[in-house]
Image (spheres, helix red, strand yellow):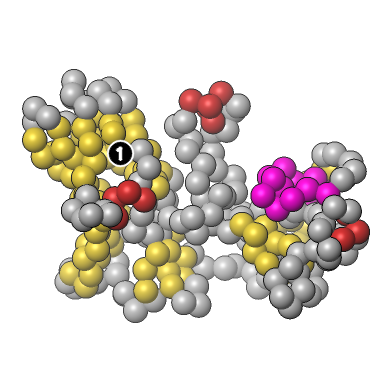
């Protein structure tokens, strides 16, 4: 028997310019005594009249199967497997009220095992108009789409638990870096802090509000490459008026 639920409890529907997203994780618990291998994830979307308006899936049926985007597919007995929803980004034209997900597992003794959940996403609506916290051209070096590092924090991973991470505080965060019109974030090789276009530039408040927390973690002594720029050097949390949650950390380079 495979039990499936989702995290977080409230799944937001984010509507962008080109697509809409439902980012969450499946948490699958194997209550049996046998290994199980996930073979397919099927998503069916339904409108207000309960009509099916789309059916999408990833599975293991191909020479290079789409299921390979799920790196960990083996579910051991009495263990929990966390899977980032691979059917998270949908066309704007899909006007759905809920999505029914069906997960199929294969067990050597029990054969095919089906389990699923139904998601009714909450449409996220911005409470306060916000501006970018800087002036100039920028790159989003990390967002929160399916492939972004902010998105891919496995909360049930033993190491993640060991270092004390119990929630994904950057699930909806963005990292920005100022850039030139060719997409370069620095001059020359970036070996000096002054080479970076964002170095020394002011960080602007994105909206009316009150600063409720600020921290300067470390002195910035040397340039850090984009690939290894995981630790923000300065953090500011701003609570805009009438907004439900604080804005996430702003990285200052």
* Segment tinted magenta in the rendering: 223-236
The image quarter containing residue 130 is bottom right
The magenta stretch spans residue 74:
no
Q: Is residue 18 above or below residue 167?
A: below
Q: Is residue 171 visible?
A: no
Percent position (x, y) of residue 41? 24, 51
Residue 192 falls left or right of residue 127:
right
Q: Position of residue 160 (x, y in %)?
A: 54, 31
**Residue 120 spot, x, y in % from top left:** 32, 58
Residue at 70% in and 71% down: 183
The quadrant of the picture occupied by the N terminus is top left
Q: Which residue is mark 1?
A: 73
194 to the left or right of 184: right
Give the residue drawn at x 46%, y 56%. Answer: 146
Residue 235 within the segment the image draws in magenta? yes
Q: Position of residue 117 (x, y in %)?
A: 25, 48
Residue at the location (75% across, 46% down)? 232
Q: Nearer the viewer, residue 29 or 225?
A: 225
């Amino acid at each position: 028997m495979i039990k499936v639920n989702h995290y977080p409890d409230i799944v937001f529907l984010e509507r962008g310019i080109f697509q809409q997203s439902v980012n969450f994780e499946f948490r699958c618990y194997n209550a049996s005594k046998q290994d199980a291998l996930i073979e397919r994830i099927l998503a069916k979307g339904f409108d207000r009249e309960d009509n099916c308006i789309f059916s999408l899936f990833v599975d293991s049926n191909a020479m290079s199967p789409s299921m390979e985007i799920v790196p960990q597919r083996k579910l051991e007995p009495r263990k929990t497997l966390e899977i980032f929803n691979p059917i998270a980004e949908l066309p704007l034209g899909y006007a759905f009220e809920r999505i029914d997900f069906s997960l199929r597992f294969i067990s050597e003794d029990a054969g095919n095992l089906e389990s699923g959940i139904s998601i009714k996403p909450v449409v996220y609506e911005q409470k306060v108009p916000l501006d970018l916290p800087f002036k100039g051209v920028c790159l989003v070096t990390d967002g929160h789409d399916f492939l972004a590092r902010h998105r891919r924090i496995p909360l049930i991973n033993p190491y993640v638990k060991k270092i004390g991470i119990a929630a994904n505080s950057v699930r909806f965060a963005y990292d920005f870096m100022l850039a030139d019109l060719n997409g370069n974030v620095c001059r020359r090789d970036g070996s000096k802090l002054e080479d970076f276009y964002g170095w020394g530039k002011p960080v602007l408040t994105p909206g009316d509000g009150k600063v409720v927390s600020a921290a300067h973690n470390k002195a910035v002594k040397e340039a850090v490459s984009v690939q290894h720029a995981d630790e923000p050097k300065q953090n500011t949390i701003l609570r805009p008026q009438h907004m439900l949650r604080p804005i996430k950390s702003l990285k200052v380079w």
